[in-house]
Amino acid sequence: MLAQTRPGAKGALLFHAAFPASEFGGSWPPGVSLQIHMMEDDEWAAEDLPAARELVEAIAGAELFLYPGDRHLFADNTCWTTTRAPRHCSSNASSHS
């Protein structure tokens, strides 16, 4: 993941999946923001949800957004649309609830 391995990265937006920080060679770099966006009932993302929760717990300021639904590629607006807000799951939440 470029945000973890490329010097100077400011942040990462993960959609549809997440991986443990160890997958890309170690810990998450200090000062690099992270947001993870997934559907609550997405069968494909279900196996990644524990890693997403682990990242949010381990990285200061990291945020996990779980959207209602079961679509995997939910950011593709050619498939469907929704106006429902995500459930914000970050333990570090400040202004998103």
Image (tube, rainbow, N blue to C red):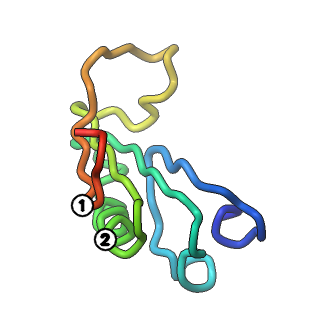
The spot of residue 11 in percent (x, y) is 60, 55
Amino acid type of the residue tagged 2 in the rendering: Glu
Query: 70 or 19, which lies in front?
Result: 19
Q: Residue at x 45, y 17 (%)?
A: 79
Query: 78 or 63, which lies in front?
Result: 63
Q: Which label belongs to residue 57?
A: 2
Determine the image quadrant of residue 48: bottom left
Mark 1 element type: loop
**Dots 1 and 2: beta carbons under 8 Å?**
yes
Q: How many marks?
A: 2
Mark 1 or mark 2: name the one nearer the start of the chain: 2
Drawn side of residue 86 relative to residue 18, left or right: left
Q: Residue at x 53, y 58 (%)?
A: 33
**Mark 1 and mark 2: span between their CA atoms?**
7 Å
1 in relation to 58, above or below: above
The spot of residue 15 in percent (x, y) is 48, 44
Q: Residue at x 29, y 39 (%)?
A: 96
Mark 2 element type: helix
Determine which residue is flagged by label 1: 91
Quarter holding the N terminus?
Answer: bottom right
Q: Residue at x 39, y 15 (%)?
A: 80
Amino acid type of the residue tagged 1 in the rendering: Ser
Quarter holding the C terminus?
Answer: top left
